Image: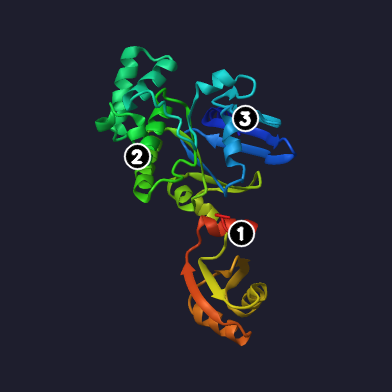
Amino acid sequence: MTAAAEARAGEEEVIHTDGLTKVFPGGVKAVDDLDLSLRRGEIFGLLGPNGAGKTTTVGMLTSMVIPTDGRAVVGGVDVVAHPALAKQAIGIVPQTNTLDRSLSVWENLYFHGRFFGMSAREAKSEATRLLEKFWLTDRASAEVLALSGGMAQRLMVARAVMHRPAILFLDEPTAGLDPQSRIALWQILEELHGEGQTILLTTHYMEEADQLCDRVAIMDHGRILALETPAGLKRSVGADTIVTVSADGQLDELARLLEQRVPGVLRATRVDSTVQLGVKGAEGVLPAVISAAEDGGFTVRDLSVTEPTLETVFINLTGKELRD
């Protein structure tokens, strides 16, 4: 790589970590030697179950949690060495509602802008613009307690981008929202992305990561297990069809039997009370599964066929479901 290319690559990188680690009292290692690089303008997802270390990672990147070891640079600023300066470059939407209940919807935006150095005129203009952009104009004078969960979350995102941060952090942004509110928030995030906003979000919803993210890091027990585009992660499975089998009997034995006897099976994994097969080519697979299971003395109760998903990738990496 030429010096000019290296310089461009450096400019495009907005988050960089080296060996980032957090050990809580009692020896609990929440994040373990994390190396991460985010590029300007991308939506990057940390996907994993509760307790994977996603929120702790965001906490360290936003100076809310002090690392035990390692280094984090966000927007060109060392977060540990210069936390106040780093905060100027970031917007944060935490899991909990942190809106000011003593202020109206519009005032939550206005005073946030003033806090970050906007003039009164600029803050008024930007607050009004964002309320329209986030479909909250008719709620401008309302108390925040009167907002629905979806509206409150949209206002939290609007407030986080009010001061035009270089990087927007969202921690489980749609957790607890109904499907309609979730889709509405997805549309807003896609619009922000289209405008060039760099976004890092954590989620345990595989559909959310697949829908929104340019790249996804699958995380469990504080470590990144895989990092790729959603399409690349799904291709890594190798299979083009996933068959889930519900049956009576010893499922570990059934998994071994089906892996040996069914043509095209790349792997068979017991997942809770089912056996999941990764298959190359789906033609004739269901009759073959039933025949092999019955010949082995198993009674098949249910079969389902899907394409590989990010949850399939997680199961292949950990042997358990993403929602565990």
Please say if 52 is above or below 79: below
Of badges 3 and 2, the one in the foreground is: 2
131 or 35: nearer the viewer: 131
> Which amino acid type is marked by label 1?
Lys
Residue 193 seen: yes
Residues tagged 1 and 2 counted as in contact (Cβ below 8 A): no
Counting other residues with Cα less than 10 Å from the Cα at mark 1, is it few (<14), some (14-19), or many (20 or more)?
Answer: some
Task: Give the residue drawn at x 74%, y 38%.
Answer: 26
Residue 144 sits in quarter: top left
Residue 295 lies left or right of residue 240; in this view the side is right
> Which amino acid type is marked by label 2?
Ser
Residue 145 percent across, percent down from the top left: 36, 33
Instruction: Find residue 303 and name its label.
Output: none
Work out which quarter of the rendered image holds the N terminus and state it.
top right
Residue 83 lies left or right of residue 29; in this view the side is left
Of badges 1 and 2, the one in the foreground is: 2
> Which amino acid type is marked by label 3?
Val
First in residue order: circle 3 vs circle 2: 3
First in residue order: circle 1 vs circle 2: 2
